[in-house]
Amino acid sequence: MLLSILTIFFDQLSKWWILNVIMVPANTIPVTQFFNLVLVHNRGASFGIFSDAPGWASIALIVFAIIISIMLAIWMWQAQETLLSVALGLVIGGAIGNVIDRIRFGAVVDFLDFHAGGWHWPAFNVADSAITLGVILLILDSLKTKSEKT
């Protein structure tokens, strides 16, 4: 659970920094040849899907994320393997970090923009990174044999 709390803290801290220090006024800040800091308010889900959905969709996304987080927290409390607990903690922390944004701003604050050859990966944030890393760790945990898990 500590990892979830730390993930939420660093996610919200990074978004505060972007909104109140870096993006005043909002602009694109080139950091390297393949990375920019930007400010995007994502009203939809992953990669902006459902961004044009009606207002109730935001509430549905909040409720869905909270329900999934509760289910994952129950799973985490029952988990006996460290890798599984870490994975679930990262996913929960990332999901709650984005829920906080939806409640506060009506959208998720994204600001990390990677690009190559004119192609941009959709902007993302610390919470999205934690969710992605958590899912990768869940997949790795699922590939372990039963004897490796004990």
Image (tube, helix red, strand yellow):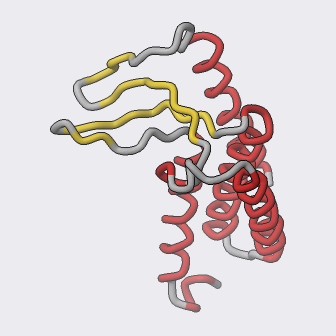
Q: Is residue 3 visible?
A: no
x and y percent of residue 16 in the render? Answer: 67, 22
In the picture, measured across the screen, residue 92 lies left or right of residue 110, that is: right
Q: Which residue lies furthest to the bottom in this view?
A: 146
- 65 horizontally vs 48: left or right: right
- Would residue 101 be seen by someone viewing this image from the given angle? yes
Residue 70, percent across and down?
83, 65
Looking at the rendered image, the quarter that the N terminus falls into is: bottom right
Give the residue drawn at x 65%, y 13%.
20
Q: Quadrant of residue 63?
A: bottom right
Query: Quick check: 34 above or below 58?
Result: above
Question: How many dots with numbers?
Answer: 0
Q: Is residue 20 above or below residue 81?
A: above
x 56%, y 8%: residue: 24
Given residues 17 and 136, the one toward you in this image is 17
Residue extending furthest front? 54
Question: Does 125 appear above or below 63?
Answer: above
Identity of the residue drawn at 65% across and 58% down: 91
Q: Residue furthest left?
A: 117
**Residue drawn at x 73%, y 32% as measured from the top left:** 105
Q: Depth check: 52 or 118 in front?
A: 52
- For residue 21, side relative to residue 133 (left or right): right
Q: What x and y, as percent, mark residue 110?
A: 54, 35
For the C terminus, give its image quadrant: bottom right
- Residue 25 in picture, x, y percent from top left: 53, 8
* The quarter of the displayed image where residue 14 is located: top right
In this view, 94 is above or below 113: below
